[in-house]
């Protein structure tokens, strides 16, 4: 049975979609613009999440989630990686996560995994990872919105539109934004 895991996977997919809808609105240079001061860039946050997910979910049940091949400090380093490479690293992590989730069932939630030498139940490891993912996706969305300013396309209910939304509620349309923004970018 996969009731709990299906719910967790849907949340991960929602956060992935929100981040991708936000970054689809950015031009390549904006992926590398830091937050105020000396903050992270969207590219660094995407590299970090991709590296984190790849490390945690590669051989999830059988090896420590903090892999020796992971270069965490490098994930946050300023770089001029092309969008395609950023997305490749991002997708690598998400593919590891979704591949692992596909092979679990709710009965696995009480099994023990190790992350950074610390034993956790699968349930605790997934909750921790989902919270970490949500935290960084929120940063990505906030950074992207700041970079776009008035040109930002809202990913959920735009300001001053709550009343019309409440009259005819729908789910967030981030996936629609991703498709539309990719089409706009391809058209030039």
Image: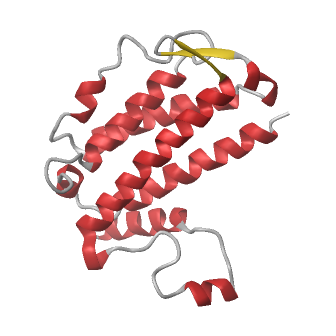
Q: Residue at x 65, y 42 (%)?
A: 9
In what quadrant of the picture does the N terminus appear?
Answer: top right
Question: Left or right of 103: which side holds 183?
Answer: left
Picture coordinates of residue 99 (x, y %)? 60, 29
Nearest the camera: 50 or 165?
165
> Residue visible at 57% across and 84% down?
162
Q: Residue furthest right?
A: 1
Image: 93 above or below 174: above
Question: Toward which corner of the image does residue 120 lie, by quadrant?
Answer: top right
Q: Is residue 126 left or right of residue 156?
A: right
10 to 51, vertically: above or below: below
Which residue occupies the foreground of this view, 159 or 168? Answer: 159
Looking at the image, is 70 positioned above or below residue 187?
above
User: Whole-percent x and y of residue 96?
Assistant: 53, 28
Picture coordinates of residue 127 (x, y %)?
A: 61, 36
Please state the total of marks drawn on the protein image. Answer: 0
Q: Position of residue 122 (x, y in %)?
A: 66, 24
Residue 165 lies in quadrant: bottom right
Please identify the quarter of the rendering in which residue 3 is found.
top right
Q: Is residue 165 above or below residue 104?
A: below
Describe the colour scheme in one phrase. Answer: secondary structure
Residue at 19% x, 49% y is: 32
Kindly identify the residue that appears in the image at 27 percent across and 45 percent down: 43
Q: Quadrant of the C terminus?
A: bottom left
């Amino acid at each position: 049975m996969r009731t709990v895991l299906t719910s967790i996977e849907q949340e991960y997919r929602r956060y992935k979609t929100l981040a991708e809808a936000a970054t689809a609105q950015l031009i390549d240079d904006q992926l590398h613009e830091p937050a105020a001061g000396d903050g992270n860039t969207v590219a660094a946050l995407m590299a970090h999440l991709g590296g984190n997910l790849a490390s945690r979910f590669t051989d999830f049940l059988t090896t420590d989630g903090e892999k020796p091949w992971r270069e965490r400090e490098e994930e946050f380093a300023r770089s001029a990686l092309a969008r395609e490479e950023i997305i490749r690293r991002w997708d690598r992590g998400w593919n590891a996560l979704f591949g692992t989730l596909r092979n679990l069932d709710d009965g696995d939630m009480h099994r023990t995994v190790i992350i950074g030498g610390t034993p956790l139940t699968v349930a605790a490891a997934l909750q921790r990872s989902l919270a970490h993912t949500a935290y960084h996706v929120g940063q990505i969305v906030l950074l992207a919105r700041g970079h776009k300013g008035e040109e930002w396309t809202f990913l959920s209910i735009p300001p001053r539109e709550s009343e019309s939304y409440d009259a005819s509620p729908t789910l967030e349309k981030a996936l629609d934004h991703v498709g539309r923004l990719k089409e706009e970018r391809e058209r030039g």
